[in-house]
Image (tube, helix red, strand yellow):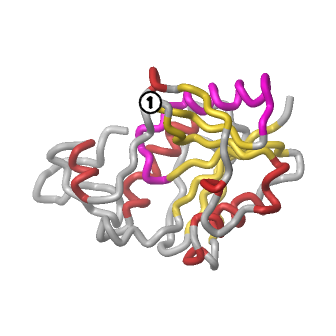
Amino acid sequence: MSRTAAVVLAAGAATRFGSPKQRLLLPRVLDRLAASPVDEVVVVEGAYGLRVESTRASVRLIHCADWERGPGASLRCGLAALGRDVEAALVIMADGPELAPEAVARVIESWRAEGGDVVAASYGGERGHPLLAARAVWSDVPDAGLRVLEPRLVPCDDLGAPGDVDTPEDYEDLWPGRERDATGGRASPATGADSPAW
């Protein structure tokens, strides 16, 4: 069976959030991927140094020096780190903490059954993540990323969208009452609370 990998894009500056949101959200995303059928996971860092902690032994962290050029540059870095036996990569956003492992599985299964160079989960008829890129398109990823390519859509409405945490308000909407601490994902000592229960 063809091998698949996840490339988690976590290289951005998170300017709208005001602090490294990746440090808060990445652990949950990795936990979700640990329950999915991907064979390996690569996390791409850029603006901030990250720590990779997951239940999967096959998670690797790579640094993209060109991250400021756009998400496509980060994706190219991640794809270049994958082995030759990987036939498709799932593009995963580090700021989508509600990623459903079942959505990853559904997109992979659809690609294996029906093919396609770009296959994406859809919610309400709109393309979303995860997005699968077959090896055939890896060599021509523009700086803007794969948004310029039209994917075949796989409905995943029943699984829920992965979310998109861009601002502190987005984070608060997901976990009301939790204070942000991007140094380690833990709430302020004043609250006495631990990190969100992933």
Q: Which residue is drawn at 43% across and 35% down?
A: 161
Q: In this view, does 171 lie to the left or right of 117?
A: left
Asked if residue 34 is among those painted magenta in the image, a careful observer would answer no
Q: Tell me the residue that label 1 is attached to.
A: 124
Q: At numbered mark 1, what does the secondary structure look like: helix, strand or loop?
A: loop
Q: Is residue 66 left or right of residue 27?
A: right
Q: Residue at x 72, y 46 (%)?
A: 133
Q: In the rendered image of this protein, does residue 95 appear above or below residue 32?
A: below
Q: Is the magenta stretch mostly helix, strand or loop?
A: helix
Residue 111: image location, x then y, percent: 75, 30
170 or 62: nearer the eye? 170
Q: For the view shown, which residue lies furthest in the left direction?
A: 190
Quarter holding the N terminus is top right
Which image quadrant is residue 71 in? bottom right
Q: Is residue 3 left or right of residue 122?
A: right
Asked if residue 101 is among those painted magenta in the image, a careful observer would answer yes
Q: Type of residue at label 1? A: Gly
Residue 114: image location, x then y, percent: 78, 25
Q: In the rendered image of this protein, does residue 150 appear above or below residue 82?
A: above
Q: Residue at x 66, y 61 (%)?
A: 75
Residue 194: image location, x then y, percent: 25, 48
Q: For the view shown, which residue lies furthest in the right direction?
A: 84
Which image quadrant is residue 173 in? top left
Quarter holding the C terminus is top left
Residue 154: image location, x then y, percent: 61, 28
Q: In the rendered image of this protein, does residue 40 appear above or below residue 106?
A: below
Q: Which residue is drawn at 31% across and 65% down?
A: 17
Q: In the rendered image of this protein, does residue 102 appear above or below residue 91?
A: above
198 or 112: nearer the eye? 112
173 or 193: nearer the eye? 173
Q: How crowded is mark 1: few (under 14 residues within 10 Å), some or many (20 or more)?
A: few
Which residues are the magenta region? 94-116
